[in-house]
Amino acid sequence: MQSIRVLSTGTGEQRGALALSKLSHTFLAPLKSGDKFVLKVKVSESSAARIFFEHYIYKLPNNEPILEAKSVVVLLGKNYRPVRMPTEVKSKLRQLMMHQEAAQRLLIMLCLLLPRC
């Protein structure tokens, strides 16, 4: 989100905070010590006050599905209550969703933080 400057501030603007309001996940297979995997996250939808994400973990090298998850994030105002997203944020989220291929460049190659890695 920071990379597309959704929450960046200019002079005189108040910075918002994000809060995870819902998370559901399904484990499909285990990972073992030393396994390498890919984490893919994409913005699947947005509403006036929420951003919906999909998360996937695939084991390398054969891209075996390990985990599927969905999460909902809300923008909090200065009193830490959910607020509607500013027009600028909604516009940038639409751009991100329309250019999902560009967002996929944000794939993160991770290795479990275990001694064998």
Image: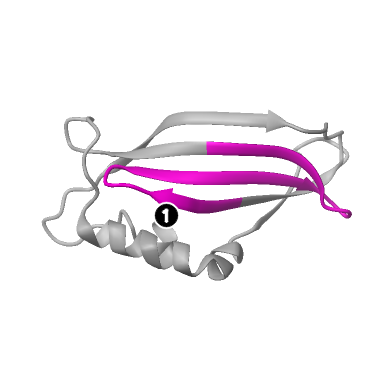
Q: Position of residue 1 (x, y in %)?
A: 42, 54
Q: Which SS type dominates the magenta stretch?
A: strand
Against 80, residue 11 (above or below) is: below
Identify whether 51 is placed above or below 12: above
Residue at x 58%, y 69% (from the top left corner): 101
- Disc 1 crowd rating (10 Å Cα; few below 14, some 14-19, many 20+) is few
Hey, what amino acid is under mark 1? Met
Residue 52 falls in image quadrant = top left
In the rendered image, residue 48 lying in the magenta stretch gets the answer yes
Which secondary structure, mark 1?
A: loop
Please name the residue shown 64% across and 58% down the image. Answer: 107
**Residue 48 at what x, y percent from top left?**
27, 46
Q: Quadrant of residue 93?
A: bottom left
Percent from the top left, x then y, of residue 44?
49, 51
Q: Nearer the viewer, residue 48 or 30?
A: 48
Q: Give coordinates of residue 76: x percent, y percent.
A: 26, 37
Q: Residue 12 appears in which quarter of the rendering?
A: bottom left
Residue 32 to residue 47: above or below: above
In the image, the segment drawn in magenta is: 41-70
What count of labels does the image hold? 1
